[in-house]
Image (cartoon, rainbow, N blue to C red):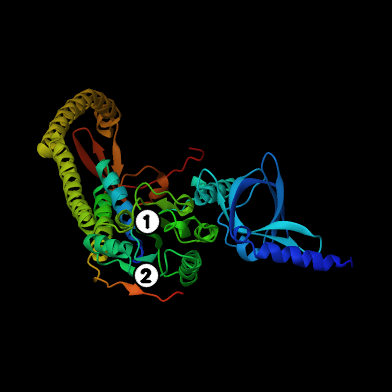
Amino acid sequence: MAANISFEKALVGLEDIVKKLESGNITLDKSIKYYKDGMKLAKLCSDKLEEAEKEIKILQGN
Amino acid sequence: MSRKIFTVSQVNRYVKHLFSHDYLLNNIWVNGEISNLKMHNSGHIYFTLKDKAGAISSVMFKGNADGLKFGLEEGMAVLVKGYVSMYEKTGQYQLYIEKIEIEGEGALYKAYEQLKKKLEAEGLFRTEIKKTIPFYPDNIGLITSETGAAIRDIINIAERRNKSIQLILIPTLVQGEEAAGNISKAIKKFNELKNVDVIIVGRGGGSIEDLWAFNEEIVARAIYDSVIPIISAVGHETDFTISDFVADLRAPTPSAAAELAVPSKAELKDDVEKYYKKLDDLVWNNIMNLRHKQELILNHPIFKYPTQIIDQNKQYLDQLERQFKLVIEKFYKDNKIRVENDISKLEILSPKNIINRGYALLYDEKNNNIASVDELKDKDKILIELKDGSVEIEINKIRVIKEV
C-alpha cells in the first residue's frame, strides 16, 4: 500500500475494507489481512489529521 | 455691393466653429435607436441614431468604444452622451458619442445577459466539464483582496475547520478597471505554479458595479481554462455572476466557499475513530464466528467420542475373528475326515501290509532297502524281514535276469 495515498483514497479504501469484513464468510487469514490493511489506512488518515498547523502564505502575483 | 466669396473648407470650418461654440450641442444626451451599425476594424463604431421622424449619423471612436461593457445591437434603444460636430471632408454633421447607456434595463445588466448567452452557447457552463472539488486539499489557493471581508471570513472558517491545510493567497484588486485583469492573471499564476489543489476566487458583497470584474469575459475564460478546480464565491447568496456559472462550484458567499473547500478536522477525526472501532468490532466478530464454527465441528461425535469409532471397529474385528474361527474349524473338521480316509488308503499300500500278506523285505548290512541284484555280490550278508521277525543270510549265487 503506497504511503503517499490521498486522504480521500485512504478513507474510501477503509470503507471498502469494512464492507468486505461486514459481508462475513471470509477466512481468518483474509480477516486478519483486511484488518492490517484497514489499520494502515486508518493510521494514514489520522497522521494526515495530525499534520502541523500552517500559517497563510501570500504570493505577490501581480 | 461687393461679393465676399468663401471656399468650401472655410464654410465647413465656420459651421464647425459654430457647433463647437454651442453650449447645448457640446454636451448632449440623446435617446434613439441604433440602425446601420458598423463595427470598423479600426475599433471605431459607426451607426445611425434614429427615432420615428429623423436620423443622425453617429460615431464612437475606439478610445470610448473600448469602455463599453456590452455589445451594441441593431435596433437597440440607447441613451447616448456626446457632442455634435461636423466632419469637414463631407460637410456632414455627426453625433460624436462618448458614452452609451441602455434604456430600460441597465447597461451592465444587458452586458451580463449578452456575455452569459455567448459563453453558454460556447459551452463554458456545461455541467459535464466541471471538475471535482478535492475531498482533502493539502493546499488551497485564494484569489481576492488582501484587505477585504472575504479573506477574513475565509481565514476564520478555514482555521476553525482545519489548521493543517495550507492557504496560499494571491492578493488582487476585486473592483475597478484593473480587477478583472488582476484576477485572471492570478488564476493563470496558480496554474503555472501548480501549488494548490483547489482555488477559491471571489469577494464580499457589493453593488453590481462592485462585482463587475466577476462578470468580465477575461475572468470567465481564465476560470474555464484553469486545470485546477475553482470555487467562485462572489458577494451574497442572491448575487449570480458569470464567474459563478463557469466555476466548477459556486459558493453563495466566501465563508461558504471555505466551508466547502476546507474539510473539518473534527468530523474526519470522528470518522477515522469510527473506522478504527468498526475494524476492531468486525474482526472480533469474524473471529467469534469462526470460533463458533470450530466449536460446532469439535462437537461432532468423531471429536467428542473419538474412541467410539475405534471401539466399533474393535467390535467388528472381534466378530470377524469369531467368524474366521468357525470357518477354520469347519474346514479343519471337513478335512480331518478326508485325511483319515487318505491314511487308511496309504496304509493299504504300506510295506507293513505287504509283509503281513506274506511277502519279505531285504536290507543290506547298512540297513538300506535292496531292490536289485546289482546291489549284491557273493558272500554279502543280507537281512530278510518277515511279518513276525527277521533272518540274516549270506549270498552264494547271483543270477541276473535281463529285461526287468
Residue B290 in the figure: left or right of residue B128: left
Q: Looking at the picture, tell me which residue is in the foreground, B206 or A34.
A: B206
Q: Looking at the picture, tell me which residue is in the foreground, B7 or B187.
A: B7
Which labelled disc corresponds to residue B206? 1
Of the residues tagged 2 and 1, which is closer to the observer?
1
Quarter of the image where one finds residue B357:
top left
Identify the chain of the residue marked 1, using the numbered disc in the image: B
Identify the chain of the residue marked 2, using the numbered disc in the image: B
Residue appearing at x 44%, y 58% in the figure: B229
| Element assignment for label 2 | strand
User: Tag 2: residue type?
Assistant: Leu
Residue appearing at x 24%, y 64% in the figure: B159
Query: Sequence order check: which comes first, mark 2 or mark 1?
Result: 2
Q: Looking at the picture, tell me which residue is in the foreground, B154 or B311.
A: B154
User: In the picture shown, does residue B292 fall above or below B124?
Assistant: above
Residue B28 percent location from the top left of the image: 59, 56
Q: CA distance from mark 2 to mark 1?
A: 21 Å
Residue A53 percent location from the top left of the image: 24, 70
User: Tag 1: residue type?
Assistant: Gly
Residue B159 in the figure: left or right of residue B4: left
Which residue bears the numbered disc 2? B169
